[in-house]
Amino acid sequence: MRPAQADTRAASPLLWLAIALPVAVHGLLLWQYTVNAPRLDDFAEILTFLPDWHAAGSLQEQLAVLFRDYQNHRYVLYHALLLAFGGIDFRTAAIAGNLALPLLAGLLLWLSRRHPQRLELWLVTPLLVFNLQAWRAMFWGPLGTTNLLYPAIGLLACWLATLGARGVLAAAVTALLLTLSHGSGPLLFPVIAAYLWLQRQRQAPVVLTGWLALTAVVFTLYFLVFPLRSEAGYSSVGTAELLANFFTRTGTMLQGFLALLGSHLLYNDASQPWKHQLAIALGATELLWLGWLLQRGALRDSPALRLWLAFLLLVAASIASGRVAYAGIDQAMQGHYKLLNGMLLWLAIAATLERYPRWALPAVMLALALYVAALAMFTGPVRSLQQALHDDVQQWQLTGKLAFIETRLYVKQPNQKIKAAIEGGFYDPAN
């Protein structure tokens, strides 16, 4: 296969307008539909953090609250933001969390600037990054700073790791930040370690040695000094048990893994099991196609993207182990994880267009069709859910009782939690 030539065509103002349009539409949707109202996990973790922090009687107790886990995630960065602002505003949190998406899109544009079909890939990028299929994460404050953040921060760390010794140092800082905000953070360390091992003949030995030493320190602190405690609500699962799931629940995990990757526009619906099968088939097809392209040299000149792919696949496997293995394949098709399948599709398109440049127009049309379909399918659910959340928290102020399913499902004592947060001055639903 001949090496692909970089695209030298100039980007026109019309192209930049087309790239900016999905970003602008997304900003308008956020501004119109975000609400300052809690839901589901917010009661167990976000509403309780500041009261628990201020009730802590010692530095050790405060550190335990700051680093406490929640469903195998550590929201240290989100906790720090709550402390910095001294209160909770779910609307502001959702908008701020979405800032990860322009960062992700910008990184993808930069890293694909020498792609042989650069302009077409640039058109595809915002259509997949800002696809409304991920609305459950986009309009939910804590998920913006976690499930929207990890693809961008993971890509940034992978790119930095390919830039030499100073880049590896910057990648270490970036990986640490992700480790303190999302459960995927520790997965960056072995991915980058494998890359540095393969590059060991081209770099000073201290680079690999230093990375391995940092990995050992981080893992010791993460898993031993501040182990999973499950004090904030839903239980976290021990690392040994998660690893054991690969051997004891292999079939379920494999189905969930593939469904995660292929569930484009498909949400969990127990009454329509065909969605599960379609998602699995699409995920398997995309993964096999991408693997075939990579074997033939696709993305060979983009080591950061290859690293990122490895990281995303590990994240998908960890979700299958920590969620699907316990609650079934429906977990793989939650809106929390929709950005993951969009990014796998982006990588598949980038690899495909290297080998088959004539497929550029169909690739753009596919991304556009998915984007338009998502707007048509999910704008209504966004509007109705956000309005229901807003109405419920407003009526709570009159009755003292929450009624909407999203504000009390699986939540222990939601009325007491929201009451304590409001009376403590940490949350004001009137804002």
Image (cartoon, grey):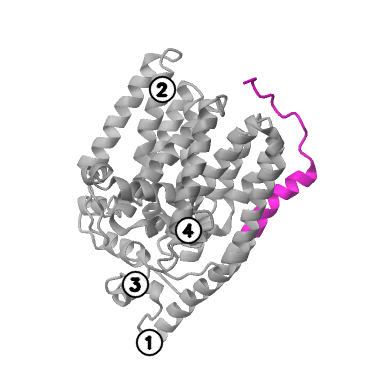
The residue singled out by tag 3 in the image is 409
The amino acid pointed to by label 4 is Ala
Mark 1 sits on what residue? 399
Closer to the camera, 202 or 375?
375
Q: Position of residue 282 (x, y in %)?
A: 50, 48
Q: Which residue is mark 2?
A: 196
Left or right position of 64 against 387: left
Mark 4 touches mark 1? (CB < 8 Å): no
Q: Secondary structure at mark 3?
A: loop
**133 versus 251 height, above or below:** below
Q: Secondary structure at mark 4?
A: helix
Magenta span contains residue 18:
yes
Residues under labels 3 and 1: Cα distance? 19 Å
Question: Mark 1 or mark 2, which is nearer to you?
Answer: 2
- Label 4 to label 3: alpha-carbon separation: 18 Å
Q: Which residue is mark 4?
A: 137
Name the residue rendered at 62%, 44% in the picture: 125
Q: Nearer the viewer, residue 131 or 152?
A: 131
Secondary structure at numbered mark 2: helix
Magenta-highlighted residues: 1-26
The mark lying in front, picked from 4 and 1, is: 4
Amino acid type of the residue tagged 2 in the rendering:
Leu
Q: Is residue 357 above or below residue 390?
A: above
The residue shown at (71%, 35%) is 358
The earlier-in-sequence mark between 1 and 2 is 2
